[in-house]
Image: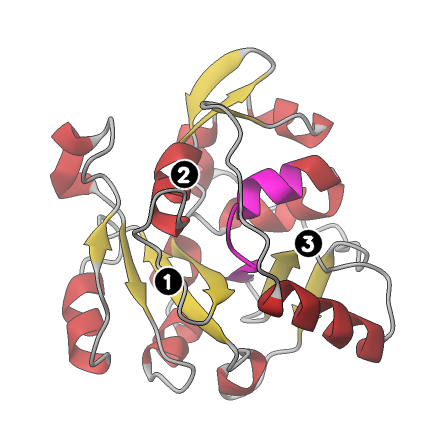
Amino acid sequence: MLASLAQKQIDNKKIDNKKIDNTQTASSLMDALDSRLDHWLVVDSTRAEDAMELAYTHEKQPELQKLFVNSPFEYLLEQSPVIFRISANSELLNVWQQSAIWRTSGVLFSTPKGTDVLAEGGLIEHLQALMRVKITGKVILFRFYSSKIWQSVACDLSVNDIHTLLGPAVSLSWIDKQQNMQSLSSASQSLSDSETRARSANLIDSSEIWVAPPTPYVLQSSVWTKWI
């Protein structure tokens, strides 16, 4: 089940570049992050136990939140994943990239700069809804912040599922076993570099409002069924 994805082996098949942006690893991830966006790291704090401490150590204004607050999982608050803002030049990016625990326990959501993630329909509300999804009629716990799932499923996701997963975010990024950052975005298609930048700019500057589907979210790509 998806609830135990952190223990499942990654399928090492080649990622389809039509849906995945693969940023080759470097000594730092700083150049890979778009300065026009705000970046929010979601971390499983039961595995990366130093997540809160490092967030406040390295970030001036992390705006850290526990995702289980005001959610159906609030009774499990001590086990809650945390989300916090991370700057594009943060030393924590190297921790995320180089630590095996952090790599497998965290993903990055990027939103247009200045977006209120706490607003109704904002990123926090979206991620709380994303923790329970329906697949083939079954409602299951979805630990989307475990990066190990994305390498296996990202290339087979439908356009509708990509939009559902991203919600109000522009992109979802994770670090793979080779310490490469990969990103899933609604603009990730088989385009030239200039076309991709132009489409990304349109997304970043768009005033379009995310309208969340009914909950629980329904994921319909056939690739999900192998996790049931």
| Dot 2: element | loop
Q: Which mark is residue 143?
A: 2
Q: Amino acid at mark 3?
A: Ser
Q: Is residue 207 above or below residue 80?
A: below
Q: Which residues are magenta?
A: 161-174
Horizontal side of 167 relative to 156 (left or right) equals: left
**Mark 3: secondary structure:** loop
* Front tag of 2 and 3: 3
Circle nearer the viewer, 3 or 1:
3
Q: Residues within 10 Å of mark 1 (few under 14, many from 20)?
A: many
User: How far separated are the C-alphas under marks 1 and 2?
Assistant: 14 Å
**Residue identified by numbered label 3:** 186
Q: Nearer the viewer, residue 103 or 160?
A: 160
In the image, 167: left or right of 86? right
- Percent coordinates x, y for residue 165 in the rendering: 55, 42
Three-letter amino acid code of the residue under disc 2: Arg
Which mark is first along the chain, 2 or 1? 1
Give the camera-side residue of 125 and 206.
Answer: 206
Give the label on residue 41, or none: 1
Count of picture labels = 3
Q: Is residue 164 left or right of residue 1?
A: right
Q: Earlier in the sequence, mark 2 or mark 3?
A: 2
Q: Are marks 1 and 2 in contact (CB under 8 Å)?
A: no
User: With respect to residue 226, does 150 lie above or below?
Assistant: below
Of residues 54 and 99, the one nearer the viewer is 54
**Looking at the image, which residue is at 54% across and 61% down?**
173
